[in-house]
Image: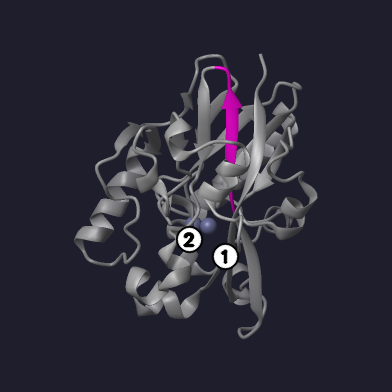
Amino acid sequence: MTVRIYALNCGALEFDRHSFFPDVPRGTPMHVPVPAFLVVHPKGKVLFDTGFHADGVLDPVAHYGKDLAAYFKFFCGAGEGVVAQLRLLGLAPGDISYVVNSHFHFDHCGCNALFTRAQIFVQAAEMRATQAARDADRRPDRDWEGPLDYRLLEGDHDLFGDGSLVIVPTPGHTAGHQSLRVTAGSGLRFCLTGDACYTQEHLERELLPIAGAVWNADEMRHSFGILRRLRDREGAALIFGHDAAQLQSLRCCPNAFA
Ligand SMILES: [Zn+2]
Ligand SMILES: [Zn+2]
């Protein structure tokens, strides 16, 4: 059985470093990659996250509102973004059978609307919390909405029933955050953490981001423990959500890194 994993370059964001590392004073910009991942399995092609919406670059104020647009700068070069990256592999959005959203922040579900032929897996808790925030009109990023084939999960889910792709709840950053454990054809095991942990440094230092990026601090620390156990007991290499140094070290699309 051949399972391959590709890291897709979906552009980058720039914002105040303080929001990632609260012990750093405000005022220093930080540039972080926005990845998505394609897992090719004999039973279907699976996308983990979809990056941010193309309008994030073209007109962020119109798309996200002025507060979010003032906080983030959006970058997406030629050949970057989920559609362009899939094209490098000869694929189009219609070739994707399954999408796994780590969570519903704008840089993880921004292109969901393109994947109309996919089953989209998200934790029910994430859907409930995001719908409640929308109903209270507190969320400008609504890219998750649409007539899409959402499959709501309550906990772990073995996507193909063979243990090769297992969705693992890792709440804390958001109410229903989830990560994806992948066993590649080489036998090597990985965990795509999403924003359960932004970078290696956060895990090493047990460091949480600013309060605005944490739904529940105790849950987030607990999820750090889940990731450590996946690493230490199951031999999974952790692929962090926004770790520039790590992503630069991976073979990039159109090559598989595993
Ligand atoms: Zn997030
Ligand atoms: Zn993110």
| In the image: residue 64, left or right of residue 51 | left
| In the image: residue 53, left or right of residue 221 | left
How far, Cα to Cα, is label 2 from label 1?
7 Å
Vertical order, 104 against 257 (above or below): below
Q: Main secondary structure of the magenta part?
A: strand
Residue drawn at (39%, 32%), measured in percent from left and top?
A: 118
| In the image: residue 12, left or right of residue 46 | right
Magenta range: 35-42
| In the image: residue 130, left or right of residue 188 | left
Q: Residue furthest bottom?
A: 27
Give the quarter of the image for residue 56.
Answer: bottom left
Is residue 98 in view? Answer: yes
Q: Amino acid at mark 2?
A: Val
Residue drawn at (21%, 64%), measured in percent from left and top?
A: 136
Name the secondary structure under disc 2: loop
Q: Are marks 2 and 1 in contact (CB under 8 Å)?
A: yes
Vertical order, 80 against 256 (above or below): below
Between 169 and 95, the residue placed more toward the observer is 95
Q: Amino acid at mark 1?
A: Pro
Measured as percent of width and height from the top left, residue 50 is found at: 48, 48
Residue drawn at (66%, 82%), measured in percent from left and top?
A: 28
The residue carrying mark 1 has its beta carbon less than 8 Å from ligand 1: no
Is residue 96 in view? Answer: no
Image quarter hosting the N terminus: top right
Residue tagged by mark 1? 209
Residue tagged by mark 2? 214
Task: Give the crowd class for mark 2: few <14, some 14-19, many >=20 residues within 10 Å.
Answer: some
Q: Residue furthest right?
A: 249
